[in-house]
Image: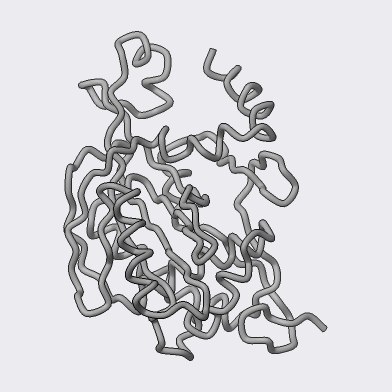
């Protein structure tokens, strides 16, 4: 008998999307191209919707599905479902408990699939399920990717695939999850990008004192210019453009040696 990775109950398990299905559905509605992504565990590119396979029906289709539904509505109301996002700032109304639980859910599922830094996110399962209200063990932030200005020759070559606007700017809709460069053994920072929306989850070691967490957040904000903390005691945030384009947001991941052969093969489709 299988055991649900979230609630620990024995029974039939289902497949849970790592990135929610609503992201793939929007991509399919705007393009005939297959979705592609990097599978960390097997070190290869896959053309499929990434999932984990050990979540019970109740956790998957009731508790976690409600979190997906909340964030989908939040992103829709903020205008993120567009093929070329050009706004310099966006106001988001949020429920801190729901958005943080959703971000932790995506980060945990991703770490489960990759088997990397799982200890940072495994401890949040009760919070994700709504069974623990202590939200002091992590911090979350948000920002925007800025549009990338293409040259006339780049527009001619890549404009159609990147849904470039008439002025030559590109900021296409993608969904992706990655680690970001932040040197610390006391925390891990996971990045979730949906279109032009950037979300970071800063997961702290369990034994960190409050003062040390505040110091790490200060260091983090000095490194990641333009990212704004989503605060527990508020319900609205104005997020603005960071210095990063969609290319920059993928750079650290895509420049890894094991990814290079796949990028060379994919680039042939654009030549």
Residue 180 placement (x, y as % from top left): 48, 49
Which color scheme is applied? one colour
Which image quadrant is residue 146 in? Answer: top left
Which image quadrant is residue 9 in? Answer: bottom right
Q: Going 48% across and 73% down the picture, which residue do you hit?
A: 65
Residue 81 placement (x, y as % from top left): 32, 49
Task: Please tell me which residue lies in front, 131 or 244.
Answer: 244
Compared across the picture, whether 76 is left or right of 88 comes to right
Hey, which residue is sitting farthest right in the picture? Answer: 1
Which image quadrant is residue 151 in? Answer: top left
Residue 255 placement (x, y as % from top left): 57, 32
Q: Going 24% across and 51% down the picture, which residue do you hit?
A: 79
Compared across the picture, whether 131 is left or right of 86 comes to right
Q: Going 42% across and 49% down the picture, which residue do you hit?
A: 26
Task: Please tell me which residue lies in front, 208 or 267.
Answer: 208
Q: Is residue 18 above or below residue 182?
A: below
Task: Please tell me which residue lies in front, 11 or 242.
Answer: 242
């Amino acid at each position: 008998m299988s055991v649900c990775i979230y609630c620990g109950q024995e029974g039939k398990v289902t497949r849970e999307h790592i990135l929610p299905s609503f992201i793939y559905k929007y991509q399919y509605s705007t393009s005939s191209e297959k979705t592609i992504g990097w599978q960390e565990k097997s070190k290869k590119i896959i053309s499929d919707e990434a999932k984990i396979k050990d979540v019970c029906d109740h956790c998957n289709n009731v508790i976690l599905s409600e979190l997906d539904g909340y964030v989908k509505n939040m992103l829709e109301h903020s205008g993120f479902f567009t093929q070329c996002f050009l706004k310099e700032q966006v106001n988001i109304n949020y429920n801190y408990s729901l958005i943080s639980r959703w971000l932790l859910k995506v980060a945990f599922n991703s770490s489960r699939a990759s088997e990397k830094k799982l200890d940072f996110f495994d401890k949040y399962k009760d919070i994700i399920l709504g069974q623990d209200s202590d939200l002091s063990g992590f911090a979350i932030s948000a920002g925007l990717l800025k549009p990338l200005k293409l040259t006339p020759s780049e527009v001619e070559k890549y404009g159609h695939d990147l849904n470039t606007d008439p002025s030559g700017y590109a900021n296409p809709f993608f969904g992706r999850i990655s680690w970001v460069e932040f040197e610390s053994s006391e925390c891990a920072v996971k990045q979730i990008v949906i279109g032009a929306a950037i979300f970071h989850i800063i997961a702290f070691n369990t034994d960190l004192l409050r003062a040390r967490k505040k110091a790490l957040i200060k260091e983090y904000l000095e490194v990641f210019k333009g990212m704004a903390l989503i605060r527990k005691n508020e319900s609205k945030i104005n997020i603005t453009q960071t210095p990063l384009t969609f290319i920059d947001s993928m750079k650290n991941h895509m420049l890894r040696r094991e990814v290079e052969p796949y990028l060379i093969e994919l680039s042939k489709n654009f030549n």
